[in-house]
Image: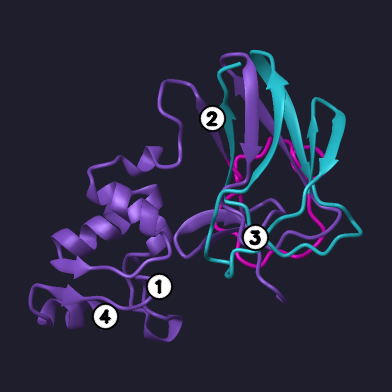
Amino acid sequence: MLRSTLRALPAGLLLLGTSLAPSPAQAEPGPRYDDEASLRDERLGWQRLVKEYDASMIQTDNVEALDYWRDGGDLERYGMLSGNDRTLRIQAEDYAPGGEGVGYHDLDPNRCTIMRVDEGVDICSSRGAIAVNWIRGGEWLRYSVDVPVAGHSRRGSPRRTPRPAR
Amino acid sequence: MILEWDGESGQRHQVMNTTHHGAYELQPLETRRLAAGTHHLVVRMPENAFQNFNIDYLQLDRGLS
């Protein structure tokens, strides 16, 4: 429904909504064009809206990223330091192999696992971002990190998303 | 959360609010010197702390020193 509606609109379209995807009740089969997915691959979001649907305005939580992309920036490097090997990014879902008690410790039932489905960690599509969700006290994740060049590193969890009461 | 590098327990960090589970932001946590090579990192959630956040990825930015 969303797709047909967008195609019916003229160029110069105004898009409203934080997420570029329809709500679950409106969802139709096929790919979603989520805001966060744009940060993984422009073809999953913003590029499709601009190229396919002639969108000229996009509402987003990621204003700086959208501006960076409009200026020709490579979204795969958005948020990274310039220069080779200065930023190392570790996807949360890429914890060590070995299963429960080795690569991770998980305490609650899976709710939305889309990867590593035989394991206990909740790996979910969070508005297009593939992320570890439903984290609970007492749980842990183990990572093997290959550092190519010695140095002082500032570590962050850029994709943390707390919200009260869930 | 607590970061344990190569078996050494680190300091505790509070995860800040971003307004929504689908709104992701970078949160700088700490600075440490890492030698070249393979390191083992455990991201541990304290049992006695309320946990309500998602993690997309971890990032290490190398400084000049």
* Res A11 quadrant in image: bottom left
User: How far is mark 2 from mark 3, CA to CA?
Assistant: 22 Å
Q: Is residue A5 left or right of residue A92?
A: left
Please state which amino acid type lies under the numbered disc 2: Leu
Mark 2 or mark 3: whose residue is earlier in sequence: 2
At 38% from the left and 53% from the top, the residue drawn is A64
Disc 2: which residue: A88
Describe the element under mark 1 as helix, strand or loop.
Answer: loop
- Subunit ID for the residue under disc 4: A
Disc 4: which residue: A2
Q: Residue furthest front?
A: B65
The front one of A135 and B18 is: B18
Describe the element under mark 2 as helix, strand or loop.
Answer: strand
Chain letter, colour cyan in render: B
Are callouts 3 and 1 both on one chain? Answer: yes
Mark 4 or mark 1: whose residue is earlier in sequence: 4
